[in-house]
Image (cartoon, coloured by chain):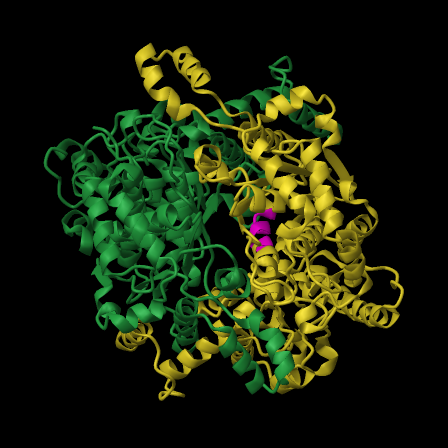
Chain colours: A yellow, B green
Amino acid sequence: MVPTRLNELPAYAELRALAARLQSADLQQLFDRDGQRGSDFTLEAAGLQLDYSKHLLDREALAALLKLAQQAGLPGRIGELLGGAPVNNTENRPALHSLLRATRAPQGLEDKFAEVAAARDRMRHWADRLHQGKHTGYSGAVITDVVNIGIGGSDLGPRLVSEALKPFHGDIACHYVANVDPADLQNTLQTLDPGRTLFIVCSKSFRTEETLTNSLAARDWMQQAGAAVADLDRHFLAITTNLEAAAGFGIPAENCLPMWDWVGGRYSVWSAIGLSCAIAVGWECFEEFLAGAEAMDHHFAAGDPGANMPVLMSLLEVWYCNFFGAGNHVVLPYDNSLRRLPDFLQQLTMESNGKRVSADGAALDYDTGPVLWGSAGTMGQHSFHQLLHQGTRLCPADFILPLTTHTGMTGQHCRLVANCLAQSRTMMVGRTTEAAGAALRQRGLDPQEAERLAPHLAMPGNRPNSMITMQALTPATLGALLALYEHRTFCSGQLWGINPFDQWGVELGKEIGVQILGRLSGDDPGGEPMDPSTERLMDAWREAL
Amino acid sequence: MVPTRLNELPAYAELRALAARLQSADLQQLFDRDGQRGSDFTLEAAGLQLDYSKHLLDREALAALLKLAQQAGLPGRIGELLGGAPVNNTENRPALHSLLRATRAPQGLEDKFAEVAAARDRMRHWADRLHQGKHTGYSGAVITDVVNIGIGGSDLGPRLVSEALKPFHGDIACHYVANVDPADLQNTLQTLDPGRTLFIVCSKSFRTEETLTNSLAARDWMQQAGAAVADLDRHFLAITTNLEAAAGFGIPAENCLPMWDWVGGRYSVWSAIGLSCAIAVGWECFEEFLAGAEAMDHHFAAGDPGANMPVLMSLLEVWYCNFFGAGNHVVLPYDNSLRRLPDFLQQLTMESNGKRVSADGAALDYDTGPVLWGSAGTMGQHSFHQLLHQGTRLCPADFILPLTTHTGMTGQHCRLVANCLAQSRTMMVGRTTEAAGAALRQRGLDPQEAERLAPHLAMPGNRPNSMITMQALTPATLGALLALYEHRTFCSGQLWGINPFDQWGVELGKEIGVQILGRLSGDDPGGEPMDPSTERLMDAWREAL
């Protein structure tokens, strides 16, 4: 199957012309001209509402984008993804993260579904045991703290979900250690009692350098506190396919939960990689999280492209990246518990779509995945929003807003909502120099000073943004939100003609890391000479010791 | 004084031609051709070492960039900044953050210096009292926890410094609450004992919405726990210029430490805004932090542009933004305790230089400040480094690496160092398709499969990056590092001809926020009608309640 070449699709030229026209569009005029825009450019799916009316887009451009999706064969590709075709073509594998949240076996995937169901039962066993305070450590004390040791997909997903669902937590506190920097583990262990702590080692291969290093240090800590080797199975679980290596570490097979090579790390929070979350919130809540994602899967599978939320969000991404030259995308969750969402989405989108060759290995002559960044609102308003409003860069934005709060403090939450809606509106409406001048005169500035300052207060507006709302941030809506971005990422990959499921680009850095470690540690002092800068930096490190 | 128009400087055209040539330069060839490059393209200042040899730059381009700096009058501008000239021209003020760390009064600034010195004495008084466990709360118990309530510059700076200097902390734990989302405060207070907690309210105006809302909730919490109104002065300090509003809140003048209008929020961690850090690490440590910054100020003032670290880093920023089309800059601290540095730098750089008009109010026809983003290494390696190595976007990078660790775990730290050097080298060297194919065949792949996969493992290399090292992350080197980025930001602002010290772009969002809050809360239900999207979203919020 030949992957898409975006700029060879018939709709591409049409979209270029439309983009040239819409580049200088006035969004408020688009609203004035199309009375239905405010209600028609919205969509509901799986408990999420998307408002995409504040985009540099009219019905004609939207129709052309949907043509692009058809020409790229997107509906068929979605079927292939969900049906288990080997969409990860460089590794000859399907990408079946959707199966992890399925409640019924899709046709032809009965065997894999049975494996998932069995793994889910084992997750439930551990989640119940720990969540209900039935699991004890070597000293007989009940486990109160779970430390997840993993990095990348084995860290960002569970860390995000655990924090986002804090109002649903039971009595177990979850901690996340990822960095090979020893300070990360050390700071976490400082406050914990070994007899009450359980570690979950998350590494598909059981070979990830950072995770193994931290796990060995955790095991030392446990043994120094008095745990015997025979007690380690009360304090260590592993999520891995490498049972042998886990056994060598001291984690018996019955403490190992499975992973599969058809689930990428950045798509794995639905598997046993999410066990720490299931322990924290309890199994029923975790199943609601899975159900929210499954609802989004069903929407994704069924919706015609024009009513398909992930497809639309992906078309918007391609619209700005390839027709407006945007190099970045900013995500602004107006909910403090989603503050790690940008970190999670960085891996999801940039590791998936930060590629320069097509799925069949040809160098592409157009841009692919943008830089994704962001922070929790209202924090960004006091930091980088200056650039969003007045900078020279196009930064398409996603605002994410739960309409209610779990805290009971509705007055304070109302302020958060007002700020979120205001930022979205401000990006669109901007302010002319004349209006800025008038505002300054109204504040009492003399006309000359008002004229001098007005250009500094003027804002161009027409800066595009989406608003994603939900009744409340619950396990179900969180699951739907993450699945939404997963599928958006897949669609963009298809439109760009790349394979979003491999990550060959990280291999060389690991190889060179091993070479340099050999040189620094003295284990392989005769290794290959490096460039003069790296050689000098290695010398500097030796001198610093 | 007419600000610079970057593209009207004589060196601009020359740099465009040089950039066209260097766009396709091979960095390893540049090293081969210039045997001194590895040592000459380095610089030392205030305990920091900068290696800028892995940039798309040769001696000719460097000379042209330095010409650009001269033509923009940069040395003179630096003198004006440090000498207290009104460089913040739209607000008719100097920007004297350097005075906050000065140990001697610069000529003409004796009065301001005396105020700073007096404030420093008062900071020391409070820092000593709390750090040494001499301050007690309403119940007579010693204060053990300090909660900083502030947002933007009143949060990001102290939060970063406190976390980065964790190995230097005494017995007081510092917490930071910023978000108006009530969950932020609620989660923090959950673990604290009112009788042992002290709040520092950081708001220059004592009117910042988020800070005031959180402070009122904190006061309620304290009073509900049993503190009388008369006890509040044992539990609340304020950093503010608005003594009246603070008194109205219940914070007497003797508990208020000053701010000045000639210090911007994002440049204020050196002032009493940093008090929480001084309490955590003790006054001597905090003075070392100031001294590190002062050492960088002296370097900045004295160094000729070619040996001036902030100037060089700024020229590199402009080089990539305006001659290579880079829209972003990634910062990668290989130290877990610096994981919040990108957040801090987002405000510093994007609020300063995210501007589209010159200091004299003319719309600019070239790009200014880029999007800044990043995360702690090695975390990013398992997340977005795929895009750094193989994406289609130019992402100039700063690696930041303390050469030693405070944890005592030198073996584990050695791995961190190896990873950092390896990522920097990998960005530069890349790997050809042929080399990738050979590596795959060596792994045992058959030639056909190796040929199919090789393009996916190939990496273009020649991706530019800086390496900033230091012997150890100490108060002094941290101070130098933050001052380095402050001055880099200033220089870029001057080269772009903008005023980096105002932030008019955030005003309109606040105004519209107030209007929407009036509509939502019912306090001003008859307010101005908004666009159809905002109206519909307000309805959705009302229905969700």
Image: B517 above or below B262: above
The answer to which quarter of the image holds residue A23 is top right
Task: Pinpoint residue B19: horizontal percent, then vertical percent.
Answer: 33, 53
Q: Position of residue A237 (x, y in %)?
A: 67, 74
Quarter of the N terminus of chain A within the rendering: bottom right
Residue drawn at x 65%, y 74% is A204
Looking at the magenta stretch, what is its main secondary structure?
A: helix
Task: Give the residue furthest to the left.
Answer: B107
| Quadrant where the image shows the C terminus of chain A | bottom left
Res. B471 in view: yes
* Part of the protein shown in magenta: A338-345
Q: Does residue B141 show up?
A: no
Picture coordinates of residue B22, whole percent (x, y): 34, 58
Query: In screen coordinates, is B120 left or right of A193?
Result: left
Count the marks: how many?
Answer: 0
Q: What residue do we see at 36% from left, 48% from top?
A: B323
Left/right placement of residue B468 relative to residue A508 reads left
- The vertical placement of A18 against A328, above or below, is above
Eyeballing the image, is B202 above or below A304? above
Q: Is residue B339 left or right of residue A259?
A: left
State which quadrant residue B440 falls in: bottom right
Q: Residue visible at 50% across and 22% down?
A: B511
Front-most of A97 and B287?
A: A97
Q: Quadrant of residue B98?
A: top left
x%, y% of residue A413? 62, 33
Which residue occupies the foreground of this view, A533 or B501?
Answer: A533
Q: Reply yes or no: does residue A147 show up in magenta.
A: no
